[in-house]
C-alpha cells in the first residue's frame, strides 16, 4: 500500500474519531435525543480502528503488477511456449487453426465446422484469466 494512501486513510480515521468525540452521534442527527441513552465513546468501534484489520480490507494489488490477460501479443508468446498446444496444432491443424488478429497470430480451437472458433488459452495464462 502506498504511503500517500495510508496517510489518506489515517486522515479519514482521524476525522471520524473527531466527529465521534464531540458527543452522541444520535443527538447530532436528532437534537431531541441529547442526553438520552449516551454510551461511553470507548464502546464504539469500527473495523478501521485496528491497523491490522485495516490492512485486510485494503489489500489491493499494485496496478503496475497487474497483467492484462487479453493482451494478444502476450497470449501469442504464451501459446508459443505451451508445448502441448503446439503439439495439438501440429497434429490436428483443422481443430487448432491459426487466426490473424492484426499483427498477431493466435492458435484457436474448432470442435466442428458448424461451431465458431475460440482462442486457446495457454496453460500458464489460466490463473490470470480466472
Image (cartoon, rainbow, N blue to C red):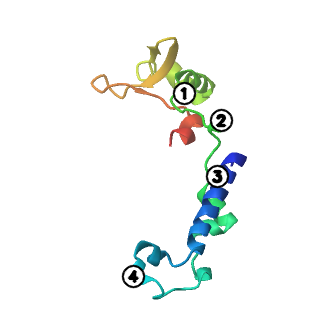
Asked if 118 appears above or below 14 in the picture, the reply is: above
Callout 1 crowding tier (Cα within 10 Å): few <14, some 14–19, many ≥20: many
**Is 124 or 14 nearer to us in this picture?**
14
Dot in front, 4 or 3: 4
Give the labeled residue for mark 2: 64
Give the labeled residue for mark 4: 32
Q: How many marks are shown on the rendered structure?
A: 4
- Residue 118, image quadrant: top left
Disc number placed over residue 85 in the picture, else none: 1
Q: Looking at the image, do the residues carrying marks 2 and 1 touch, with CB atoms under 8 Å apart?
A: no
- Residue 52 visible in this rendered orientation of the protein: yes
Of callouts 2 and 3, which one flags the residue occurring earlier in the amino acid sequence?
A: 3
Q: Looking at the image, do the residues carrying marks 3 and 1 touch, with CB atoms under 8 Å apart?
A: no
Classify residue 73 as left or right of residue 34: right
Residue lying at 65% horizontally and 35% vertically, measured from the top left: 64
Callout 3 crowding tier (Cα within 10 Å): few <14, some 14–19, many ≥20: few
Of callouts 4 and 1, which one flags the residue occurring earlier in the amino acid sequence?
A: 4
Q: Secondary structure at mark 1?
A: helix
| Structural distance between the alpha carbons of marks 2 and 1 | 29 Å
Dot in front, 2 or 1: 2
Amino acid at each position: 500500500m502506498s504511503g500517500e494512501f495510508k496517510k489518506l486513510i489515517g486522515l479519514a480515521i482521524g476525522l471520524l474519531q473527531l466527529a465521534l468525540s464531540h458527543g452522541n452521534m444520535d443527538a447530532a442527527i436528532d437534537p431531541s435525543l441529547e442526553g438520552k441513552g449516551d454510551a461511553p465513546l470507548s464502546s464504539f468501534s469500527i473495523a478501521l480502528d485496528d491497523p491490522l484489520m485495516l490492512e485486510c480490507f485494503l489489500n489491493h494489488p499494485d496496478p503496475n503488477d497487474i497483467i492484462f490477460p487479453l493482451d494478444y501479443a502476450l497470449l501469442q508468446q504464451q501459446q508459443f511456449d505451451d508445448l502441448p498446444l503446439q503439439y495439438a496444432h501440429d497434429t490436428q491443424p483443422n481443430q487448432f487453426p491459426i487466426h490473424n488478429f492484426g499483427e498477431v497470430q493466435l492458435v484457436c480451437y474448432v470442435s466442428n465446422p458448424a461451431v465458431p472458433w475460440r482462442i486457446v488459452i495457454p496453460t500458464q495464462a489460466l490463473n490470470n484469466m480466472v
